[in-house]
Amino acid sequence: MRILITDDLEISRTILKHALASLNCEVLQACDGEEAWGLIQGEDAPMLLLLDWIMPGLSGVDLCRRIRAQYDNNLPYIILLSAMNEKANIVEGLNAGANDYLTKPFNTAELLARVKVGIRVVRLQVQLSERIRELEGARRQISDLARLLPVCMYCHKVNPEQESWSDLAQYVEAHIDVEVSHVICPDCRAAHFPELQ
């Protein structure tokens, strides 16, 4: 699991990184919203973000809005950190797209508990995405199989419904807007009627 800490204060990033050390996660750091945005858009992007609200340029709330507007699937889990503890601030942060909100100064045990929740959610999202891909692959296979028409290699009868066998010509006339005419191909004429050659 990769976790991104975004805060313009180096001391805050250091405290957060130290607090997360027990989780055995890879911790990345960004000093502002623009640097964080670049990391979020890169390959193997972090899926859990700790964003400070107040930063120069792109704030944590602005970054939340940008992330939610950009990504439909595999959204990162966002914990917004702020010294602003009014209910209106918390509501604004959550409405901007944060999954969780933690006020500063934070309690380390509470921070770790909330990060662990985020890790569980991210892992469930990844598992769900994998299952969806597997189901889509299975659906494509079923769709491909549904287009197959079983034909007997000897009598050339067909079994489209996996129930009863019927004449190929009758099936074609019933399902395709054509009439079947019976002819003998050159190979069969040579094999069965050599005297006509």
Image: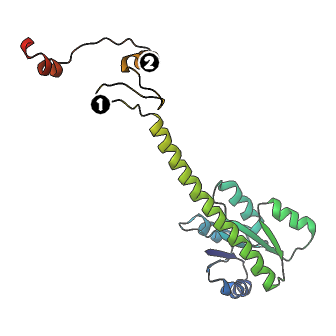
> Which residue lies at the image location 65% right of the left edge and 70% below the top edge?
36
Q: Which mark is residue 98?
A: none
Q: Quadrant of residue 39?
A: bottom right
Report the residue at 88% width, 74% height from top. 84
Question: In this rendering, would 82 be left or right of 31?
Answer: right
Q: Is residue 163 above or below residue 68?
A: above
In the rendered structure, which amino acid carries the disc numbered 2?
Answer: Ile
Picture quarter with the N terminus: bottom right
- Label 1 Cα crowd, 10 Å radius (few <14 / some 14-19 / many 20+): few
| Amino acid tagged 1 | Met
Quadrant where the C terminus is found in the figure = top left
Q: Whole-percent x and y of residue 40?
A: 61, 66
Residue annotated with mark 1: 153
Q: Secondary structure at mark 2?
A: loop
- Name which residue lies at 50% across and 49% down: 137
Q: Position of residue 186 (x, y in %)?
A: 16, 19
Label 1 vs 2, first from the N-terminus: 1
Residue 154 at x, y = what percent?
Answer: 28, 28
Q: Nearer the viewer, residue 86 or 114?
A: 114
**Disc count in the image?**
2
Q: Residue at x 42, y 34 (%)?
A: 148
What's the CA distance linking mark 1 and mark 2?
21 Å
Residue highlighted by disc 2: 176
Q: Is residue 16 above or below residue 150?
A: below
**Which residue sits furthest front?**
164
Q: What element does badge 1 sit on?
A: loop
Q: Is 181 in front, or is 44?
A: 181
The quadrant holding residue 104 is bottom right
Compared across the picture, whether 39 is left or right of 57 comes to: left
Q: Position of residue 52 (x, y in %)?
A: 76, 74
Quadrant in which residue 152 is drawn: top left
